[in-house]
Amino acid sequence: MADASAPTILLVEDNEINRDMLVRRLTRAGHHVICAGDGEEALAKMHAQMPALVLLDMNLPVKDGWTTCREARANEHIQHIKIIALTAHAMDTDREAALAMGCDDYATKPIDFPSLLGKIAECLPE
Amino acid sequence: MKLRRRAFSLRARLYLFSGAILTLFAINVATHVWGSFARSESLIAYRDTVTASQLITDLAQSLEANRQQVLVLDTLRETTEQPLGDEERSSAFEELDAISQRLRRLGGLGGEGTEDYYRRLHESALRLLDDWRKFYDSYNQKEISIDSESGVSYNDTLQRLRELDQRQEFLAVQRSNAIDRTISITDRITVIGFVTTIAVTVFLVIALIRSTNASLLRLKTGAQRFGSGDLTHRIDARQDAGEIGDLARTFNDMSSKLQRAIDEVRSAKADADAANAAKSMFLANVSHELRTPLNAIIGYSEMLQDEMSDANPIDRDQFHHDLGTIIFSGRQLLSLINDILDLSKIETGKMQVGYETFNPASLVLQVCDSLSPLLVQRNNHLELNVDVDSVGDISSDRSKLQQIVTNLFSNACKFTENGTITVSTLRVDAAIHITVADTGIGMTEEQQEKVFEAFVQAEADTGTLYGGTGLGLAIVRDFCAMLGGDISLNSELGSGSTFEVKIPVAPTSDRASA
């Protein structure tokens, strides 16, 4: 299913159920997905595997999504990596805060999967 | 050292002012009366002197006339031998009586330092009058001669009369001078008194106006500052006693009361704002918490739908497991909704406490038994220190105590792995102590402070890592309070947590009557 040449997507999500669900659905949609459970791990994998896109949950243990995003944007090695914020906070202010923090896009839980695929397609190079 | 000016009330000031004016007025009147009195005294004395002078002249004339008459009669007596008629004699005696009467009047007028002169005059005049009486008495008796002696007394009397006259003249000059002096002194005193009165009155009026004006100005300034919202300002009431001071203090009191009222309103508004913010935060949290299980439910359902509709064969085991996940998330959503409803009921005061008699130790055993699957999940071991008999029955709300124990037990299972969970019950006096201890991850002091608040888990991630709504301990705390008890927590990061619940064995009086 997953195309070997497809760009890598890093999914950062601490909730096992949601992580499992998204990994499976994205893989089914033809994406190459790797996972991280917290912000530290996410930064480490961004450095190590240089994914094309990060789907970043904002409520993370060890280092939350906001901090992770800020640190990624401040680091010249990984600052080019696209980031789509995922959060169950559905207020407009959260969306603005995420975009202001340097996220390229924003998706609310429960995830509207077709819409998420659209956003991913926009972020990934052809 | 600073001298403090004594404060006078407005009334006292007015009284003092009126008193001072009246005193000055009285002094003026008294000066005037004294001046008039002194003047009339001097005038009376002067008039006496003038009267005395006239009397002396009269006396001198009368004496002269009588002397002439006596000399004429004496010559007649020697030459004519004609006797003196009774009528003539009595007329002469009357004349003598008139003279002695005038003499007495002269004595009555007196005068300073004239007593000696008058006494001498009186003696010599009496002698002369005696001589003349004898002359008239013995006029018809030829053998008695009288003339020579009478001449001596006459001259003597006249001499005395002249001396008295000189004395009276001297007195008259003296008294006239005294009158001049008195008039000039009283006039001066009156003028000085009058001018002083005017000056003091003007000074007092100015002082009264200035002091009253200053007091009123302080009041006005203070009232204006209060009016412009400066309620910390205080009017200086120390400089004013009485009404104005009272007014200033009343203003100050009013200001502090206003300040207090405003503070109360402000703090009430802050409380209301905080409550409002808490409510918004609660709503945002509820929204967040509901979305997390919904994400799984919708996500898995859509995924299963996709898998059903494509051509690939279905992995039945995977399919079954995924359905289980949907059910699990649905249940979590339900329990979340129930918890939210419970909390909302507690907050609005609609949660009822239903008392019944039951054995809490048996309840604890039942809960532990029914939750034993949770124990197995993370390979935990349960230790029970529960003795049904020694604890005995209590009167409380069974379902609430059941939820308290359930929440604490499932929390302990959730945050402990390969450890021991110890549940104990103990009766201490009129309370039952239920302790749930674990050897799990524990909490920092900072986390312990917030752990009983709604939607707070030790870390933002704890809910997703360990499940749960973040409402369980908030409900436990509120239920404990409703049952008249309390909950305490003892924990150390990395070595586990111990929750101890204390519930009274019977409803406390105020709770029972409520």
Image (cartoon, rainbow, N blue to C red):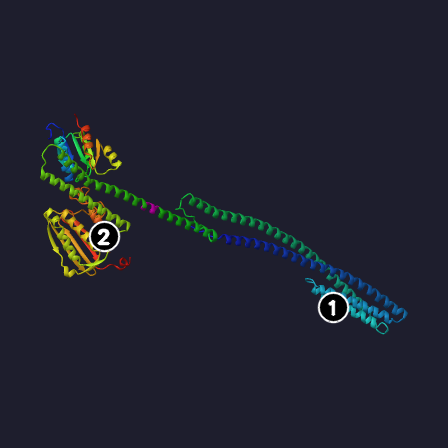
**Residue B471 x %, y %:** 21, 47
> Looking at the image, is mark 2 or mark 1 earlier in the sequence?
1
**Residue B243 x %, y %:** 48, 52
Question: Tag 2, which secondary structure?
Answer: helix
Q: Are marks 2 and 1 in contact (CB under 8 Å)?
A: no
Look at mark 1 in the image and give the residue it sits on: B123
Instruction: Give the dominant element type of the magenta stretch: helix, strand or loop.
Output: helix
Q: Which three-letter amino acid code belongs to the residue tagged 2? A: Phe
Is the C terminus of chain B in the top left, top right, bottom left or bottom right quadrant?
Answer: bottom left
Q: Which segment did they paint magenta? A: B266-271
Look at mark 2 in the image and give the residue it sits on: B479
Seen from the viewer's position, the closer of residues B339 and B458 is: B339
Any magenta on residue B505? no
Q: Which three-letter amino acid code belongs to the residue tagged 1? A: Glu
Question: Tag 1, which secondary structure?
Answer: helix
**Distance from label 2 to label 1 (Cα)?**
136 Å
For residue B502, side relative to residue B223 (left or right): left
Q: Chain of mark 1?
A: B
Select label 2 or label 1 by which is in front. 2
Residue A103 visible? The answer is no
Residue B280 visible? The answer is yes
Q: Are marks 2 and 1 on the same chain?
A: yes
> What residue sits 72% from the left and 66% below the top?
B120
Seen from the viewer's position, the closer of residues B425 and B368 is: B368
Q: Chain of mark 2?
A: B
Kindly indicate the quadrant of the structure image that contains residue A36: top left
